[in-house]
Image (tube, coloured by chain):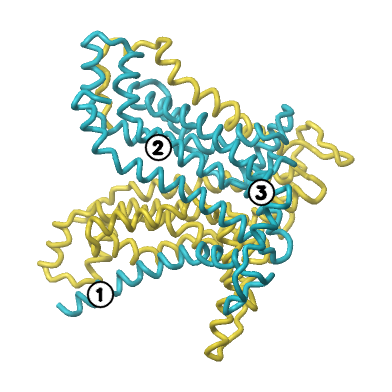
Chain colours: A cyan, B yellow
Amino acid sequence: MSADRFIAYGLRGWFLVALIFIYVPIVINFIYSFSPGRFPTLPLGGFSTGWYELILSEAPVPRAFANSLKAGVIVALISTFIGFAAAYTDYRYRFLGKNIYLALALLPPTIPVLILGLVMLMFLSRVSLVGELYSVVLAHVVYCIPFAMALIRLRLAQIDPDLESAAWNLGANSWRAMREVIVPFTLPAIFAALALTMAVSFDEYLIAFFVGGLTETLPVRVLALLQGQVNPRINAIGSFVFAISMSLVILAQILLLTRRSGNRGIAAGGA
Amino acid sequence: MAHNALTHPAARKVDGYALFWGLPLVLWQVMFFVAPLVFLVVMTFWTVKNFRLAPDFDTVNWVNMFSKSYVIDTYFRTLGYGALGAVVCSVLAFPASYALAFKASPIVQRIGLFVIITPFFTSYLVRIYSWQAVISDSGLLNGLFGLVGLGPFDMLSTLFGTMIGYLTLTMPLVILLQFFSLTGVDRNLIEAAHNLGCGRLRTVFLVIVPSAKTGIILACTFAFILCFGDLVSPASLGGSKPPTLSILIVDTVKQGNNWPRAAVVALMMVLTLIVVAFTAIFFAYRVKKEKT
């Protein structure tokens, strides 16, 4: 028995090591964003908010930040709408070529972002849609739809299939059943998809780098800084990026965990 | 998947309602995903004359890229790196996924998943930058080694550095997928193996791993896809030398703006990924013919 316990501790310990490995770079980034020196030192040289003041005083970072936020919000809205529509189509209809339809909906993230960025640059530059913030939006939506679609589709799989037909039988037309049954039921997943797609767009740097041209988003700014020498600005920018994208991802997860209560809401007739 | 929402007659008809929900995806992805990919194929046959892109139908780019030994070398190196990253990640992640699936209470499982998933979606780029500070010659890790009189070790700009980056990229996803496949393993099978006197390790490798095969293979495949196409790890942690295909693409685009040649490399990568993905799916879902 003691061997069993020993192995169990060993395995849990391994899990903790994996967790530490995943979180080390994030923690290090936060710590060194407050370091006064240019190079990371051991032990820490002191405490300073100098790098934060510096990045906020230079125009490119706030501008890139604003670009990222704008693009993120628009991408989230469009890709969540399309993702919802696709998930609902998959849920409700059977049709010829459905596999192709699903491939369109789910394939983009399996293609490396570098290649997506490159092909979109080649294509969008032919139709003169390159180098603007909307170019980034067009391309990011392609990449984000699958995440929204997957989240909402999972939620639709939990719906009682009789609910929608019950609404029809009670005289609701398709639109009304959508509004009063499907949408309220999937609302947590819709909000989760909004948060997650915004996080994905907010973090994506290669597609944005290729199609954005001189219109930089925040991670593209980081990419530019990363090319040069050791640059502690990245730590300070990174803290912002982490704070925002982690909040969004955590929000998405919390929304998804509330699915049970949503079920009861519908069953009780409320929305 | 159940499709039992077809009771309403309108559900079978193609009407405005159906089109309203069905079409947006098709329109958007055909315009901004399929068309660019098709154009990528076309682009590989275009030529560059006097630094200007010209529509053409010439196999010169293909011939050119395939006749260079460093392109071929880089191709196989990238395959090797991707495979190594995927295998190393799968092996290192497995005990962690196993612990979460079998040695944790439901609450711990939920919290564990929560903390594992979150970083997957948060700035990979910044995390790689942090690793630079950790593994560089005068970095934190060598500082720690120095305290006990070891090192300094060369870690940045080596294959080790690249692998650290790959693991950073893939670990959360691989643990997640392995975890889900492990929780799907029938506990009765494990009980039965124990009762029949099957040892611990043998139970893991003869019962649990085969039962969770689909998820384990898919996790490894996703890890390969991510590593194979990654630019930042081999460039920023691996030092770009020797290059991978991603680095080759960026260099080809930057130097001389030779898009058609970059397109050839990109197309090679896409085709490779398609072959790998379908092979993996074949093995993941194959039902082994039982020996009798």
Query: Marks 1 and 3: same chain?
Result: yes
From the image, tell me which residue sits under label 3: A220
Q: Is mark 3 on a helix, strand or loop?
A: helix
Which of B3 and B64 lies nearest the eye of the viewer?
A: B3
Q: Do the CB atoms of the residues marked 2 and 1 lie less than 8 Å apart?
A: no
Q: Looking at the image, is A203 positioned above or below residue A189? A: below
Q: Which circle's residue, 2 or 1, is located before the other in the chain?
A: 1
Reply above or below: A255 against B65.
Answer: above
Residue type at mark 1 is Ile
Residue at x-position 69% and y-position 70%: A38
Disc 1 vs disc 3: Cβ atoms closer than 8 Å? Answer: no
Element assignment for label 2: helix
Query: Which residue type does callout 3 highlight?
Result: Val
Q: Distance between the residues labelled 1 and 3?
A: 45 Å
Q: Which chain carries label 2?
A: A
The local crowd at label 3, few if under 14, some if 14 to 19, many if 20 or more residues have their Cα within 10 Å, is many
Percent of width and height locating residue B15: 40, 10
**Quadrant in which the N terminus of chain B appears:** top left
Amino acid type indicated by mark 2: Ala
Give the Cα distance between marks 2 and 1.
37 Å
Residue A32, disc = none
The residue labelled by disc 2 is: A150
User: Are the residues at dot 2 and dot 3 in contact (C-beta closer than 8 Å)?
Assistant: no
For marks 2 and 3, give the one nearer the viewer: 3
Q: Which of marks 2 and 3 is nearer the N terminus?
A: 2
Note whether A266 is above or below A147 in the view shown: above
Residue beneath the point at 40% across and 43% down? A252
